[in-house]
Image: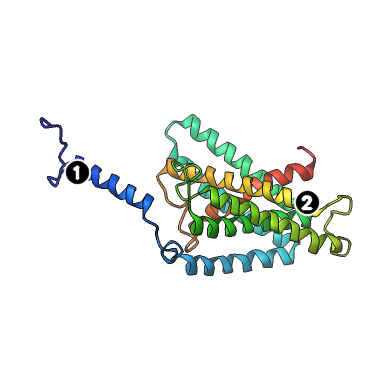
Amino acid sequence: MGNGRDVLAGGEPQVELRKRDRMKATARRYVRVPLAVRTSDLPKRAASAAVMLAVAGGALWAGGIALTLFIVVVAAATYAELVRLVVRATVRPGWRIAGLILGAIYIGFAAYSLVIMPRFYLYLVIGSVIFTDTFAYFTGRTIGGPTIAPRISPSKTWAGLGGGMAGAALFGGILVQAIVPMSDSWHLGIDAYPWSSLAAIAIGAIAAIAAQSGDFLESWLKRKAHMKDSSNLIPGHGGVFDRTDGMLPVAVVVGLLVTGIA
């Protein structure tokens, strides 16, 4: 203490440890990590994603009570993980209760919207989120660049956001061209809506921003709770909340539009 150098239990000066940490951080900023290293978790993520898509796709194809039950189960699992994050992230009872109530409203309305919305909007929500995540992942890992909010989510870059918006817009355009002409026979519930590719592209881009906002919200909660993932339920993806964080705000936005509140 007398010479201004704090000493750790092992006898190593803490100042030197901090200096090494600063050097490592500087190196990470200027040394380009090979793409193979940045995408090393891709096989595990892809396998888990295939299983999730198969289950979700089966529920979507079955429709009716099977789809409703699937949405309810996923929403319940998401809320359970949110409760865990909120409890760990808060100390004051008032903030904890408020977080749990707002979380229940947020997730509950998103699930309700997914249950009641016509098929076209359901496809729009799911596809926009999938295309946003996929394009943002590869664009962000390949291009890199400045991060949006490094103190909340160090891996989210502006390049990734741009790629996610492009991917969601692309999906919106494809959706209109491929599905709207068949809306009558598919009973999609959009007969009265004058859809155009431009409108779907714009909504897709907005959905991408909403999805990224949901991602940031969960990342902020995890940082407050000192947790890397909401759980370890899904190999390579973390928990259920880690997969639904982007879909929740998109479902809320689209649900407000569908129900005529917005």
In-image side of 207 versus 94 (left or right):
right
Residue 240, located in which quarter of the rendered image? Answer: bottom right
Of the 4 image quadrants, the one containing the C terminus is top right
Q: Residue at x 83, y 52 (%)?
A: 195
- Residue carrying label 2: 198
- Residue 252 higher or lower than 40, as above or below: above
SS label for mark 1 = helix
Crowd class of label 2 (few under 14; some 14 to 19; many from 20; radius 10 Å): few
Q: Earlier in the sequence, mark 1 or mark 2?
A: 1
Q: Is disc 1 in contact with disc 2, using a CB cutoff of under 8 Å?
A: no
Q: Residue 17 sits in which quadrant?
A: top left
User: Which residue shows up at 59% across the image and 50% down it?
Assistant: 162
Q: Is residue 68 visible?
A: no
- Nearest the viewer among 188 and 148 is 148
Label 1: which residue? 16
Amino acid type, callout 1: Glu
What amino acid type is highlighted by mark number 2? Leu
Q: What percent of the width, then of the height, locates residue 201?
A: 73, 52
> Residue drawn at (48%, 46%), measured in percent from left and top?
147
Residue at position x 24%, y 43% from top?
19
Protein image colouring: rainbow
Q: Residue 74, position in %: x, y?
A: 60, 55
Position of 250 relative to 56 (above/below): above
Q: Position of residue 107 (x, y in %)?
A: 62, 45
Is 29 left, or right, of 230 in this rendering? left
Residue 203, given in percent of the width and then of the height, sits at 72, 48
The answer to which image quadrant residue 139 occupies is: bottom right
- The label on residue 244 is none
Q: Secondary structure at mark 2?
A: helix
Q: Is residue 233 visible?
A: yes
Q: CA distance from mark 1 to mark 2?
A: 57 Å
Local packing at callout 1 (Cα closer than 10 Å; few below 14, some 14-19, many 20+) is few
